[in-house]
Amino acid sequence: MAERGRFLVLEGIDGCGKTTQLQRLSAWLPASGLMPPGAELVVTREPGGTALGRALRQLLLHPPGDAAPGSTAELLLYAADRAQHVQQCINPALVAGHWVLSDRFSGSTAAYQGYGRGLPLPLIEQLAGIATGGLRPDLTLLLELPLADALRRRGGRPADRIEAGGDAFLQRVCEGFGALACQHGWHRIDAGRSPEAVTQAITEAITAAIRRGPEAGPTPHG
């Protein structure tokens, strides 16, 4: 039986550079020597990592007309996306010995719907447990960037429904990510540096975490 694969997640507010770093990691990880022979890298995202997830993503981020979900419905839709994602994509890959790299996971729900929308964190944690079956990432990398810098990087790009929540909402999300990053299994990355420096910090954090093994605590910052 193949050794169970590793599950890595990138988190952070929109504009922090996740897309760029995801592309760089997609090229680096298979050649890094960290993955065992025969293991493949599955790159995915939330919401939208499955066919059902892609339909839910459209409803969540670009709903037609007056179809925008309320806060509780929004939370449940994200939970549905995650349950399908874990069952159909993430768990089968990990069981087969492959590695999974995801743009967002349950940390985003806690940050956006918990700290941002003000929904109860215990409820969010309970739903996450149901949706994931208890699955947690081996390492969550938080790309930290002040909100003003993230908004500047986004420039004139049209905002989706979540991004259009307003500066006060997004600031609460930023603060929520900061609180979540104190948990076991998280690692902070200063995303205000050049893309090359951020990539180096991420690859060093992943290498150190894999070599430490699952029982070691997270390092505080990179």
Image: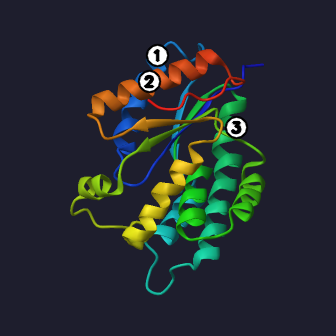
Q: Residue furthest left?
A: 156
Kind of element beneath mark 1: loop
The reply to whether dot 1 and dot 2 touch (C-beta < 8 Å) is: yes
Q: Which mark is residue 32?
A: 1
- Residue at position x 62%, y 27% from top? 98
Whether residues under marks 3 and 1 lie with C-beta atoms below 8 angstroms apart, the answer is no
Answer with mark 2 or mark 3, whichever residue precedes in sequence.
Answer: 3
Q: Nearer the viewer, mark 3 or mark 1?
A: 1
Badge 1 amino acid: Ser
Q: Is residue 126 visible?
A: yes
Residue for point 42% across, 72% down: 165
Q: Position of residue 196 (x, y in %)?
A: 29, 28
* Mark 2: secondary structure: helix
Q: Nearer the viewer, mark 2 or mark 3?
A: 2
First in sequence: mark 1 vs mark 2:
1
187 lies left or right of 198: right
**Amino acid type of the residue that numbered disc 3 sits on in the rendered structure:** Pro
Q: Quadrant of the N terminus?
A: top right
Q: Position of residue 38 (x, y in %)?
A: 59, 17
Q: Which mark is residue 92?
A: 3
Q: Amino acid at mark 2?
A: Thr
- Among numbered discs 3 and 1, the one appearing first in the sequence: 1
Q: CA distance from mark 3 to mark 1?
A: 23 Å
In the figure, is residue 159 to the left or right of 188? left
Which residue lies at the image location 63% right of the left edge and 17% below the top edge? Answer: 212
* Position above or below: 69 against 98: below
Image side of residue 12 versus residue 92, left or right: left
Residue under pointer 2: 203
Q: Quadrant of residue 61?
A: bottom left
Camera-nearest residue between 145 and 141: 145
Name the mark nearer the viewer: 1 or 2.
2
